[in-house]
Image (cartoon, rainbow, N blue to C red):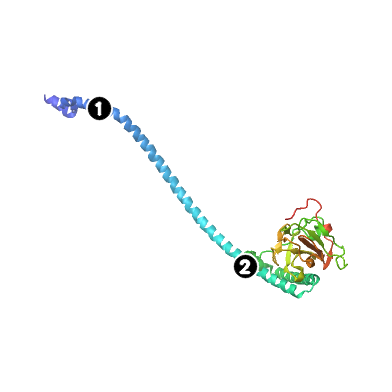
C-alpha cells in the first residue's frame, strides 16, 4: 500500500481515476473542444493576417500623409512664386498701359497739329526716327554697362521686356500680304481722283460690319479720328514703311500697341465712310481706303497683296 501511494505521489492518477463520476462530462468536453479548436485556429490565423494587413495599410497611410504634406508645402511655395509673378505681371501691364496712354496722347497731339495726312505721316516718321536714335543711344549705353545689366538680368526681364518686332522685314514680304478686308478694288493706285490728281492709295469695297485685319506685323503709330477723314489707323511696318487705313467705323487698337499680321484692328460700318476718308470716292456701301508709304512717299500696294490663297476678311 505504501509503495502504491508512493508511486501515485510521483505520478498522479488522471482525474478519471479520482472522480469517475465526471467521465461523461469530460468526454463531452473533449468532443466539444475537438470541434471548436480547428475553427478557433482558423479565426486566429485570419485575425493574424488582418492585423498584418492593417499594419501594412497604416504604413502606407503614413507614407501617403507624408507625401501629401510635401505636396502641400510644394504647392505653397509654387503659390507664392505665382503670386510674385502675377504681381510683377500686373506691374508690367500697368507700365505698358501707361506707355500706351502716353503714346496715344502724343499721337493725338500730332494729329491736332497736322493739317493733312501727308503732314501727319511726316511728323510720325520724324518721331519714329528720333525714337530709333534714342534706342540706339540706349543700346550703346547698355553695352557700356553690360556687367551691371547681367547682374540685374532677372529684375530687368520682368520690369522691361524686349520690344516686339516684325518676324520678317517688311521689304521681303512683297507679294505675300493679305488684304485687310475682302472685296473688290473700287479705285486703283494712280487712278485720277475727283480733282484730277493721281490717287495715292486704293479703295476696297467691303460688306457691312466686316472685320478689318492688319496685313502685316507692325507698331500702331496713330489710331483715332483725324479732321474730315474720320477714323484713321497708321501702322509702322519698319524699314520706313507705313500702312494707312481709313474709312472704318471702329478701331480696336491704340497707339503704341504692336499688332501681328491677321490680327483684327477695327470694323467697318453699315454705310459708306466720308468721301474724304476714301480719297473722294463716293460709294453706296462700306469701303476701306488703304495707302502704303515708303520713306514719306506713297507706293502702289497692288504688288504687295498675296495672289495665292488670299485670306478672306470679315
122, 132: nearer the viewer: 122
- Element on which disc 2 rests: helix
The extreme bottom residue here reads: 113
Give how far across and how far down residue 200 sits, in percent.
Answer: 84, 65
129, 214: nearer the viewer: 214
Query: Where does label 2 land, which residue?
Result: 94
Give how far across and how far down residue 198 sits, in percent.
Answer: 87, 65
Q: Measured along the vertical axis of the image, is residue 122 above or below residue 47? A: below
Give how far across and how far down residue 123 sits, in percent.
Answer: 78, 72
Q: Measured along the vertical axis of the image, is residue 16 above or below residue 255? A: above
User: Looking at the image, can residue 60 be seen?
Assistant: yes
Q: Are marks 2 and 1 in contact (CB under 8 Å)?
A: no
Q: Which mark is residue 30?
A: 1
128, 40: nearer the viewer: 128
- Element on which disc 1 rests: helix
Quadrant of the drawing holding the C terminus: bottom right
Tell me the residue at 54%/57% (across/down).
Answer: 78
| Horizontal relation, residue 31 to residue 296: left or right | left
Give how far across and how far down residue 7 sits, in percent.
Answer: 16, 26
Q: Please identify, in this view, whether the residue under mark 2 or under mark 1 is nearer the observer.
A: 2
Q: From mark 2 to mark 1, how far is it between C-alphas?
A: 93 Å
233, 69: nearer the viewer: 233
User: Looking at the image, can residue 13 be seen?
Assistant: no
Q: Which mark is residue 135?
A: none
Q: Residues within 10 Å of mark 1 (few under 14, many from 20)?
A: few
| Horizontal relation, residue 41 to residue 260: left or right | left
In which quadrant of the rendered view does residue 247 lie? bottom right
| Horizontal relation, residue 161 to residue 304: left or right | left
Lower position in the chain sequence, tag 2 or tag 1:
1
Amino acid at each position: 500500500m505504501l509503495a502504491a501511494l508512493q508511486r501515485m505521489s510521483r505520478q498522479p492518477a488522471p482525474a478519471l481515476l479520482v472522480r469517475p463520476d465526471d467521465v461523461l462530462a469530460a468526454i463531452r468536453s473533449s468532443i466539444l473542444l475537438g470541434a471548436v479548436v480547428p475553427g478557433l485556429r482558423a479565426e486566429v490565423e485570419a485575425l493574424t493576417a488582418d492585423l498584418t494587413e492593417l499594419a501594412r495599410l497604416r504604413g502606407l497611410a503614413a507614407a501617403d500623409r507624408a507625401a501629401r504634406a510635401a505636396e502641400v508645402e510644394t504647392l505653397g511655395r509654387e503659390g507664392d512664386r505665382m503670386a510674385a509673378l502675377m504681381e510683377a505681371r500686373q506691374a508690367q501691364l500697368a507700365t505698358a498701359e501707361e506707355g500706351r496712354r502716353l503714346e496715344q496722347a502724343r499721337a493725338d497731339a500730332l494729329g491736332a497739329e497736322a493739317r493733312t495726312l501727308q503732314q501727319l505721316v511726316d511728323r510720325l516718321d520724324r518721331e519714329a526716327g528720333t525714337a530709333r536714335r534714342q534706342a540706339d543711344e540706349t543700346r550703346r549705353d547698355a553695352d557700356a554697362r553690360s556687367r551691371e545689366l547681367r547682374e540685374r538680368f532677372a529684375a530687368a526681364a520682368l520690369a522691361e521686356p524686349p520690344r516686339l518686332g516684325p518676324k520678317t522685314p517688311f521689304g521681303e514680304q512683297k507679294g505675300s500680304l493679305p488684304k485687310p478686308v475682302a472685296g473688290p478694288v473700287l479705285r486703283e493706285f494712280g487712278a485720277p481722283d475727283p480733282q484730277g490728281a493721281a490717287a495715292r492709295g486704293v479703295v476696297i469695297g467691303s460688306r457691312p460690319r466686316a472685320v478689318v485685319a492688319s496685313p502685316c506685323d507692325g507698331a500702331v503709330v496713330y489710331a483715332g479720328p483725324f479732321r474730315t477723314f474720320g477714323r484713321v489707323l497708321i501702322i509702322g511696318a519698319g524699314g520706313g514703311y507705313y500702312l494707312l487705313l481709313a474709312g472704318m467705323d471702329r478701331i480696336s487698337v491704340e497707339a503704341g500697341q504692336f499688332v501681328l499680321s491677321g490680327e483684327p484692328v477695327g470694323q467697318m460700318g453699315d454705310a459708306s465712310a466720308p468721301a474724304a476718308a476714301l480719297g473722294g470716292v463716293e460709294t453706296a456701301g462700306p469701303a476701306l481706303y488703304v495707302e502704303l508709304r515708303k520713306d514719306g512717299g506713297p507706293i502702289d500696294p497692288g504688288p504687295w497683296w498675296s495672289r495665292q490663297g488670299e485670306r478672306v476678311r470679315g
